[in-house]
Image (cartoon, rainbow, N blue to C red):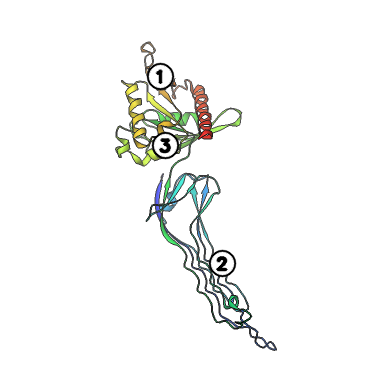
């Protein structure tokens, strides 16, 4: 199951209290203060993991509570630190404070860590308060409470190429032919109900990631169909491929519909490098010719079923990725 949004409760551990103690040993009169400090409480930490693809684990377990720090002890023994909890999340996870809406961080790299609830500081023992004029302090500090909050985790898939199209445009079939991904494929609309990622092997041991985004319909930016639920995943893609069924009675209108849906959702989406992929050319009569588009648009006809022009498509996709890289360098 693909889960891209969860809300969880995180509680960091309290710090241990400092100790008030005086050294007691035979033949050592007036041994002085020896109360140790309390240990710091454990924190709640998020860590990016490139092997994860969903937030599913956090849909079952909502509460995460770290260990508290141990209290200080006599003989200048400090309390042990509380054990922190490290939660693994997929790359592309946006973290927000559920109450204020503040963005706490964005996990985009493998191994990247973000402290979402900091453990409480341990209190100082009375040994810390000793001075030349105050040799027998009885002061000590209690441990500080750990942070507690509700946080929202929102996953936005990271991919090089995002496949965009109406339902049943052939996105899943194409992804299955150019990568080892195995999305659900059927001859009815809305077969894909969750995004799928596929790694496309390219020349000279290079590769790029393609995302199959569930089909969009007119009004998707207002929440119709699958709406905002999956439009957000297109934000993370570096370039776009508009997949249009070559048997569509008005393919240019379909392209404009898709384009305006993305633009209505976010102006930044339509500024990404893109191309048009005409799918299912095996279903049209060669005598009828291919649908036409504006001259300045890059259009490539393919048949994922027969395998027509798939190598040329990989070349075009890789060029889009390079174009996006150059664009990112200058921004």
Pick whichever, 28 or 277, lies toward us: 28
Q: Is residue 285 left or right of residue 323?
A: left
Of discs 1 and 2, which sits in the foreground? 2
Q: Report how far apart the C-alphas of labels 1 and 2 lie in the structure.
A: 66 Å
Of discs 1 and 3, which sits in the foreground? 3
Q: Residue furthest front?
A: 133
Secondary structure beneath label 2: loop
Which quarter of the image is occupied by the N terminus?
top left
Mark closest to the chain's N terminus, 3 or 2: 2
- Within-10-Å neighbours for mark 1: few <14, some 14–19, many 20+: some
Secondary structure beneath label 3: helix
Reply above or below: 139 against 273.
below
Mark closest to the chain's N terminus, 1 or 3: 3
- The picture places residue 128, in percent across and down from the top left corner, at 59, 75
Q: How many marks?
A: 3
Mark closest to the chain's N terminus, 1 or 2: 2
The numbered mark at residue 81 is 2
Residue under label 3, please give it.
234
- The picture places residue 7, in percent across and down from the top left corner, at 39, 53
Residue at (60, 77) in percent of width and height: 127
Is residue 124 in sight in this rendering? yes
- The picture places residue 37, in percent across and down from the top left corner, at 57, 73
Q: Residue furthest top?
A: 287
Q: Report how far apart the C-alphas of labels 3 and 2 lie in the structure.
A: 42 Å
Q: Is residue 87 left or right of residue 253?
A: right
Residue under label 1, please give it.
282
- The picture places residue 129, in percent across and down from the top left corner, at 58, 77
- Within-10-Å neighbours for mark 2: few <14, some 14–19, many 20+: many
Secondary structure beneath label 1: helix
């Amino acid at each position: 199951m693909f889960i891209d949004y969860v809300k969880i409760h995180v509680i960091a551990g309290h710090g241990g209290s400092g100790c008030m103690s005086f050294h007691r040993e035979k033949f050592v009169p007036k041994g002085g203060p020896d109360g140790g400090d309390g240990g710091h409480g454990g924190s709640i930490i998020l860590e990016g993991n490139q092997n994860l693809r969903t937030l599913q684990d956090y849909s079952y377990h909502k509460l995460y509570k770290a260990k508290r720090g141990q209290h200080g002890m006599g003989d200048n023994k400090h309390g042990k630190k509380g054990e922190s909890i490290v939660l693994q999340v997929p790359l592309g996870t946006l973290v927000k404070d559920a109450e204020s809406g503040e963005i706490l961080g964005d996990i985009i790299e493998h191994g990247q860590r973000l402290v979402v609830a900091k453990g409480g500081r341990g209190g100082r023992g009375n040994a810390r308060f000793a001075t030349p004029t105050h040799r027998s302090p009885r002061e000590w500090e209690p441990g500080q409470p750990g942070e507690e909050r509700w946080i929202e985790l929102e996953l936005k898939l990271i991919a090089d190429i995002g496949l965009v199209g109406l339902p049943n445009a052939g996105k899943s079939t194409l992804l299955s032919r150019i990568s080892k991904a195995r999305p659900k494929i059927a001859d009815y609309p809305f077969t894909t109900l969750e995004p799928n990622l596929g790694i496309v092997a390219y020349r000279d041991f290079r590769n790029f990631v393609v995302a199959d985004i569930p089909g969009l319909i007119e009004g998707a930016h207002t929440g119709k169909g699958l709406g905002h639920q999956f439009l957000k995943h297109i934000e993370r893609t570096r370039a776009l491929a508009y997949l249009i069924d070559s048997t569509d009675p008005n393919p240019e209108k379909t392209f404009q519909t898709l384009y305006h849906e993305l633009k209505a959702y976010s102006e930044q989406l339509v500024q990404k490098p893109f191309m048009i992929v005409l799918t299912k050319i095996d279903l049209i009569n060669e005598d009828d010719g291919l649908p036409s588009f504006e001259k300045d648009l890059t259009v490539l006809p393919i048949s994922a079923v027969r395998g027509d022009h798939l190598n040329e498509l990989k070349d075009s996709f890789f060029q889009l990725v390079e174009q996006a890289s150059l664009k990112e360098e200058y921004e």
